[in-house]
Image (cartoon, rainbow, N blue to C red):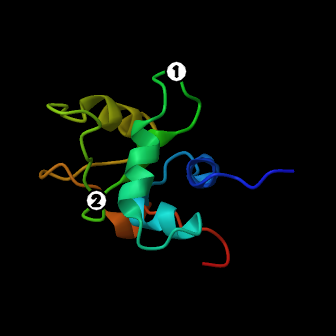
Amino acid sequence: MSELTSYERIYAVVRRIPRGRVATYGQVATLAGLEGHARQAGYALHALPATTAVPWHRVINAQGAISARAPGGDGLHQRLLLEAEGIEFDARGRIRLARYQWRPRGQ
């Protein structure tokens, strides 16, 4: 059996994020064994095709905000997906991590 690539490890972590919860890029990287490589998590998610089943929309930045997936993107699609899962945004467009951040068992 071959060893998983860093992107595959990132995708495996993102698949574990439950509906109605979010994780930060840094948190995903750490859980994938890539501590300190939050940008790599972002690059991996950006590389996903539009038709992916990986719930990329559940990953946000450390400030609780959506990071645009594409230049000029406003994150509206991601916000709508999160709101459909019951996640609320404040007036500044941020998510309260204390309430919605995923905390895997043993972490």
Q: In terms of image quadrants, where is residue 97? A: bottom left
Residue displayed at 70% across by 53% down: 4
Nearer to us in this view, 5 or 66: 5
Q: Is residue 6 above or below residue 11?
A: below
The extreme top residue here reads: 51
Q: Quadrant of the C terminus?
A: bottom right
> Marks 1 and 2: CB-CB under 8 Å?
no
Q: Is residue 26 above or below residue 4?
A: below
**In this view, the mark in front (1 or 2):** 1
Horizontal and vertical percent position of residue 77? 31, 28
The extreme bottom residue here reads: 106
Q: Indicate the amino acid at tag 1.
A: Thr
Disc 2 on helix, strand or loop?
loop
Taking the image as drawn, is residue 13 in sight? yes
Q: Is residue 33 above or below residue 89?
A: below
Labelled disc at residue 4: none
Q: Residues within 10 Å of mark 2 (few under 14, many from 20)?
A: many
Q: In terms of image quadrants, where is residue 3? A: bottom right
Disc 1 on helix, strand or loop?
loop
Q: CA distance from mark 1 to mark 2?
A: 25 Å
Circle count:
2
Q: In terms of image quadrants, where is residue 84? A: top left
Residue displayed at 46% across by 45% down: 44
Q: Residues within 10 Å of mark 1 (few under 14, many from 20)?
A: few
Name the residue tied to disc 2: 64
Q: Which comes before the other along the chain, label 1 or label 2?
A: 1
Horizontal and vertical percent position of residue 69? 29, 37
Name the residue tied to disc 1: 51
Horizontal and vertical percent position of residue 1? 87, 51
Does residue 19 appear left or right of residue 26 in this picture? Answer: right
Taking the image as drawn, is residue 86 in sight? no
Q: Indicate the amino acid at tag 2.
A: Gly
